[in-house]
Amino acid sequence: MSWNEHIDISYQDLIADMDDICPCEEMSSEDPSFILYTSGSTGKPKGVMHTTGGYLLGATLSFKYIFGYREEDIYWCTADVGWITGHTYILYGPLSNGATTLMFEGIPTYPNPSRFWEICDQHKVNIFYTAPTAIRALIAKGDQHIEGYSLSSLRVLGTVGEPINPEVWEWYFRNIGKSKCEVIDTWWQTETGSVLISPIAGITSKKPGSATLPFFGVKPSLVDKDGEEILGEGKGNLCINHSWPSQIRTVYGDHERMIQTYFTQYEGKYFTGDGAKKDVDGYFWVTGRVDDVLNVSGHRIGTAEVESAIVTHEDVAEAAVVGVEHEIKGQAIYAFVILKNSERDKTELNSEILDAVTTSIGKIAKPEVIHFSRDLPKTRSGKIMRRILRKIANNDTNNLGDVTTLADPSIVEELIRSKAFSDNSL
């Protein structure tokens, strides 16, 4: 490259007069730390602002205790550093504890589906933190890609980003954890800053599919449609009753949007936007976004529940369910399904998947359409963009909203085309 004196700056000249030691800048605990944009229900991203002291406290304590961190540990979170998980559990949480944190750029299946396990063995990783989406992608590639890797250094396995199906939890525990590692299913959000509901490694008894119990000082509750708190067992909207250190302070440039989004639905509570169940032991089972609850012929059915039923089929790697308008039922269920074995007869598979849903939930939850696909629209962090799937299923594709964070934008057009020519479409 040739030197352009009008735009180029010499790095050597810049540092020539710099001191060897850079003093820390004193900050107030409530000074802004960073702004991270996350998707909104309207498609317009929200600039979630976190502050210096409270956020760092949440990141530091949750990393140390939830993962059972030890000084000699090698820790690896596979997330994109531009996602809240990358911020909190690649950078701030590990480094504030003096941990060795491994950073990775790429996808779990390239150059081959053994990539994660190769890195775990090569660097003797002790704590491994990834998303259910990544795990499902690796399940779809087959267990043969684990063969030849000992994974003996692993002690704790974490999941983040969405509820993990019990079947996926079990596969992770048996095949990657060799039935010995802790599986830590964490629930939190960009807005919460750090994990709020999770097992504590070495302490909390696990239940596959459950995020288990609240972290220190966190007071979650379930609220019914009338705004009444559900005591004991039950199912409702997940709220947080009291403030916690790492919570969102504002939506950048639009504080009123933060108030309206999180603090107006239930007086004195933070509304997470998620639904959950609480069992007899007080364990929380997050069922997914409440805007992902379908009303089929008067029956409220959670999309996560249907997705879990679909992936019980041995040939299904991943599923995403959305609602579509139906003139008789009000809403019908539309399922996008990724297969492990795409060579099988689709008509036969369609019937078997419907049977699996009927067995797990009942006939009322049977999808009206099963749309087979090679992939789903996901962000680079692995989050499924259900808003886009909803629009595709409902033939509302003129304005798909913000798609700039998609890892593979081509899948959107592919899904639109395959829906248009699908034999079993509504």
Image (cartoon, rainbow, N blue to C red):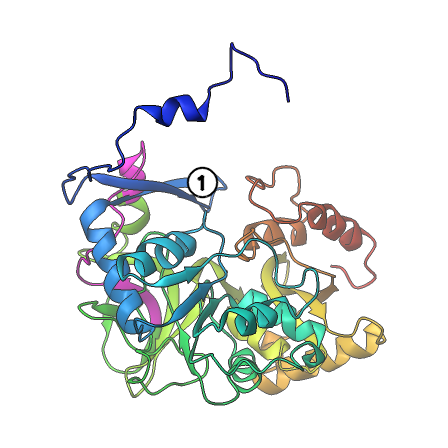
Q: Is residue 200 left or right of residue 128?
A: left
**Amino acid identity at mark 1:** Pro
Residue under the image location 19 percent in, 63 percent down: 241
- Residue 221 placement: quadrant: bottom left
How busy is the neighbourhood of tag 1: few (under 14 within 10 Å), some, or many (20 plus)? some
Q: Quadrant of the N terminus?
A: top right
Can residue 72 be seen? yes
Measured along the vertical axis of the image, is residue 422 above or below residue 127?
above
- Residue 393 placement: quadrant: bottom right
Q: Nearer the viewer, residue 243 or 333?
A: 243
Q: Position of residue 323 (x, y in %)?
A: 58, 60
Measured along the vertical axis of the image, is residue 153 above or below residue 11?
below
Residue on which disc 1 sits: 45
Residue under the image location 38 percent in, 51 percent down: 87
Measured along the vertical axis of the image, is residue 136 above or below residue 149?
above
Q: Nearer the viewer, residue 278 or 174?
A: 174
Residue 256 within the magenta-colored segment of the rendering: yes
- Residue 359 placement: quadrant: bottom right
Can residue 246 be seen? no
- The magenta segment is 236-258
Q: Nearer the viewer, residue 240 or 19?
A: 19
Q: Is residue 163 left or right of residue 414?
A: left
Q: Position of residue 362 (x, y in %)?
A: 58, 83
Q: Position of residue 222 (x, y in %)?
A: 29, 70
Residue 144 within the magenta-colored segment of the rendering: no
Q: Is residue 32 left or right of residue 408?
A: left
Count all numbered tags in the image, as a single digit.
1
Q: Is residue 263 left or right of residue 43?
A: left
Q: Quadrant of the C terminus?
A: bottom right
Q: Position of residue 43 (x, y in %)?
A: 50, 41
